[in-house]
Amino acid sequence: MRRAAGVTTSSLVRQLSAWTGATPATPAAQDRAAQDRAAQNRPAAAEPSLAERLGGWLDWTDAIALAGVLAPLNAAEQGPAAPEAAALLRQALAEREHVQAALLREIDGAAAYHQSYAAMQRLMAERIGALRSRLRALLQRASPRLARLAALDAAMEDLLRLRERHLLSHVPTLAQAHIAPEGAEPGDTGRAQQTLLRAELELRLQPVDGLIEALEQAAPQREPQA
């Protein structure tokens, strides 16, 4: 399956950067900055770790919720994947394809009939959230190790739901000048909204793709055909 782009290199970040004039901190940009600092003998500023960044979003009660799913695996949880893991992977891929195709049709229709951007965001959140829940159920059947990953994903989704909703709610505001510029033709406005919604859909599917990739790695590989 196609690997999802990182957050800073996603289509949504690139599109918003192009429209607002901001520059995303891509890996290539970070490398150039490091080279510039080295040439000037300047030490790099300490980058906060992932744990430190999450610590700014979560409180101590959230940490308690995470502690249980982050405990070391016991011997029983380190067993092999179930024989039907390959079939579960095919089901997961089919479900993702179905949801993505349906949402793309909704996005195209929203652009054509000028439906609310916020309404489409709510629809994506609802359908992708349901898909993510179904994929976690598949992981729980695949192996004890993947069941633990499913529990971690459920906890993280619950803890970060409000943060995600808050951040993504600013997307239409940031792009308002391009979604609905003064004097724009309806077709131009619809195409701009369509571009942004498709990019946001790609971003929202990243956790789904992560679950599928974990299942893909656990599923038995097919024997090469002669």
Image (cartoon, rainbow, N blue to C red):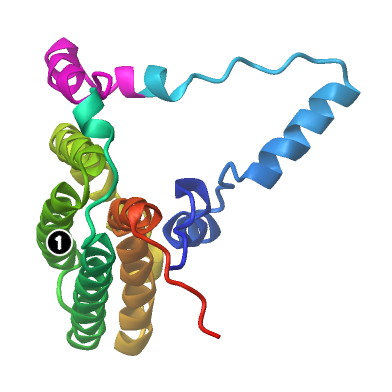
Asked if residue 215 is positioned above or below residue 188 in the image, the reply reads: above
- Quadrant for the C terminus, please: bottom right
Where is residue 184? Give x, y as percent.
37, 81
The residue under the point 15% across, 40% down is: 154
Q: Is residue 204 magenta?
A: no
- Quarter of the image where one finds residue 65: top left
* Residue wearing tag 1: 131
Front-lying residue, 97 or 86 = 86
> Would you call the spot at circle 1 few (<14 residues within 10 Å), some (14-19), or many (20 or more)?
many
Q: Give the range drawn in magenta.
A: 54-73
Front-lying residue, 72 or 66 = 72
Prevalent SS, magenta region: helix
- Quarter of the image where one finds residue 179: bottom left
The residue under the point 87% across, 15% down is: 41
Element type where label 1 sits in the image: helix
- Quarter of the image where one finds residue 87: bottom left
Front-lying residue, 132 or 165 = 132
- Quadrant for the N terminus, please: bottom left
Where is residue 202? Give x, y as percent.
36, 64
Note whether residue 79 is visible: yes
**As drawn, which residue projects farthest toward the top?**
60
**As drawn, which residue projects farthest toward the right?**
39
Residue type highlighted by circle 1 = Leu
**As drawn, which residue projects farthest toward the front?**
226
The residue under the point 19% across, 26% down is: 69
The residue under the point 46% across, 72% down is: 223
Left/right of residue 177 with respect to residue 19 in the rendered view: left
Left/right of residue 35 with respect to residue 132 in the rendered view: right
Left/right of residue 184 with respect to residue 138 in the rendered view: right
